[in-house]
Image (cartoon, rainbow, N blue to C red):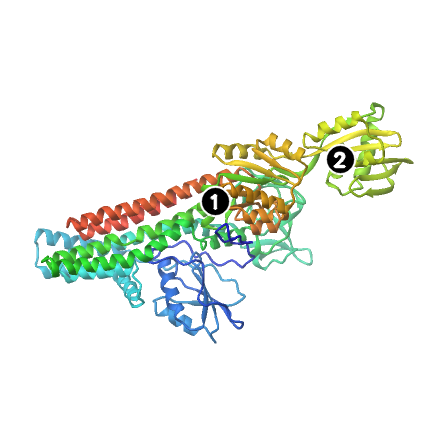
Amino acid sequence: MNQPTSGHDHTKFKPVALQGSGTGHAHDHACCSSTAHAPAAIQLTEAASADSRFSSFRIEAMDCPTEQTLIQNKLARLVGVEQLEFNLVNRVLGVRHVLPDTGSIEEAIASLGMKAEPIVEGQEPEVAPPAAKKHWWPLALSGVAAVAAEVIHFADLAPTWVVALVALVAIFSGGLGTYKKGWIALKNRNLNINALMSIAVTGAVLIGQWPEAAMVMFLFTLAELIEARSLDRARNAIGGLMQLTPDMATVQQADGQWREMHAKEIALGALVRVRPGERIGLDGEVVSGQSTIDQAPITGESLPVEKRAGDKVFAGTINQAGSLEYRVTAAASNSTLARIIHAVEQAQGARAPTQRFVDSFSRIYTPAVFALALAVAVIPPLLMGGAWFDWIYRALVLLVVACPCALVISTPVTIVSGLAAAARKGILVKGGVYLESGHKLDFLALDKTGTITHGKPVQTDYVALDPLVKELAVKVAASLASRSDHPVSLAIAQRAVQQNLVLHEVEAFEALLGRGVRGEVNGELYHLGNHRLVEELGLCSPQLEAQLDLLERQGKSVILLLDGSGPMALFAVADTIKESSREAIEQLHELGIKTLMLTGDNPHTAQAIAAQVGIDQARGNLLPGDKLLEIEALYAKGHQVGMVGDGINDAPALARAEIGFAMAAAGTDTAIETADVALMDDDLRKIPAFVRLSRQTASILRQNIVLALATKGIFLAITFAGMATMWMAVFADMGVSLLVVFNGLRLLRK
């Protein structure tokens, strides 16, 4: 349900087979690009053909926007390709096309120096294997040779040809990969970091700056390695979720025997046993046994949760105490954990506002810088009598300094780190756009039932109107209530069960629609119902009205037991407030966010609950369309509005809000699908935690942009003044890149 006025897309949960994380190794290139990042799905044609098909490929070398841009530009020129879908976390490319086979796609990708391995349709791809460990000695040799070239040149220890030879050893031992990727980028008219660095080093060699060329290539390669390992930390934070689910689970067979099976082969409805200390392999419902479960991987709860028959358990959580048997309710590929992983992967395709700004800026910035460098190299010598050597050297330094690497890499690293940090807290954010825009919220609307309250009414009051029949009234009321499926009746019956009362047989039982029930107990007719039923029977009085009004103003529903002579007793039932709700509202107010409760309950109940929790405003008697209108009214007053809900009736308001929060544990699928953020354990305190994380993310994004642009500006001025050297330029560029990466990774700290 995308609303055009909200300005963002809703990434939905989808039951999909998980793809391998492919994490855990360093890459041989810097994860940055001089061109714009594309969104996760790119439509290349106006509409998909009726006979189009979808093919998937694993591309080990594709793990950052540099490769994505090259592949996108290459395949966009291939006739028959209609849409591309990039999953950089898993290094998987999806292609919708009308080609007879995938050979031309594989050839096009091979021309970019990458290998595309087709993934068989309908087969769940395996986890990407770690890349072969790279030898460290070429980089060490490059570093030693670069330092040696500098020393020999500075101390004038040998002829120039010796310096050149040593420098070439440094360049080619450490920079062959950069040259190869730079050449591929240039052939495809893409000015990425590898192309710019290749041009700069080659230019330095051509003007005889051998030591600087060697040092630039070594420093660049070293910085790439450090940056790649740093970026892997952000990737591993998400990919590590895949390691939470065990591969095997103990399943009961048709003959009653228990046998270990692969989790992905276990069918729905199967009975699985989990021992103390084991991880739970699949989502399910406890059939027998009792234990405590550590649900932190799913919900972020710090304390273990008691589980017994009828309770839900989640894949990836840890059984701590007793043995449990549970019935499987979701396949391995559609478990709650699998959906979390998939949603976080998909979330990276929804670019945050800052990232869109950086992409647009880089699209113009890089060609402009290249043109400026060319002008610096040519115009002063031709028109101003400058020395060719000096101005070409300055142009090469300018190319290195002005590379937008730090600017481009700062946003995705920060967003991925923020998404992973949120997932650790049990907050599932469906896109970087929501993570970043969360800091703007100044008003939060909340549903009542199941959100602020537990959603399960309990008996709170019992008043015997005739003291002589106090015990009898309780038993008769519970006997009648036990025959009804209404939540209020169930609350009265549940209290009797807790008190171990022996109930009476009920005869001639009848449900009275919208009013209550009646039946005979021991030959006498009794009614159990609401205020309307009492009025219909003509048994109301001013004194009784006053009692009912007092309880109803406290947000309670009142049920009366009546015999032929009049009311015998009254029972008050209320939906109890979650303890976490009060604390959450208090934290929201501390953050400067005002609150509004929206409920279908009567206004008295709404006001009573709002007062108990500390909510600023409350609206009652609302239908789903009315909740939507309340959100619209807040927008009309200039507020940035969030909405929290758990039911189908909340879906329109969730979709309209700037950010929709779903109570995912008790929430309906419709609410979860429509919302932008899911709270995995229904704890409202996670919303202020999300706002704080959003504010921190937005702050780090701003810091990174200011740091990158300010450093570029300072070194550009130094370059034009003729004071900068090429190795200083590399320190300026790659040093800032590393700083923004480390700054973004701060979000992963607990």
Residue in the image at 31% along x and 57% along y: 364
Checking the image for residue 492, the label placed there is: 2
Residue 413 is left or right of residue 273, and the answer is: left
Q: Is residue 477 above or below residue 383?
A: above
Three-letter code, disc 2: Ile
Q: Position of residue 517 (x, y in %)?
A: 82, 40
Three-letter code, disc 1: Ala
- Would you name the residue on which mark 1 appears? 422
Which quadrant holds residue 505?
A: top right
Residue 471 is left or right of residue 388, and the answer is: right
Q: Residues within 10 Å of mark 1 (few under 14, many from 20)?
A: many
Q: Are marks 2 and 1 in contact (CB under 8 Å)?
A: no
The local secondary structure at tag 2 comes to: helix
Residue in the image at 33% along x and 46% along y: 705
The local secondary structure at tag 1 comes to: helix
Which of 535/713 is in front?
535
Which of 98/305 is in front?
98
Residue 45 is left or right of residue 708, and the answer is: right
Q: Quadrant of the C terminus?
A: top left
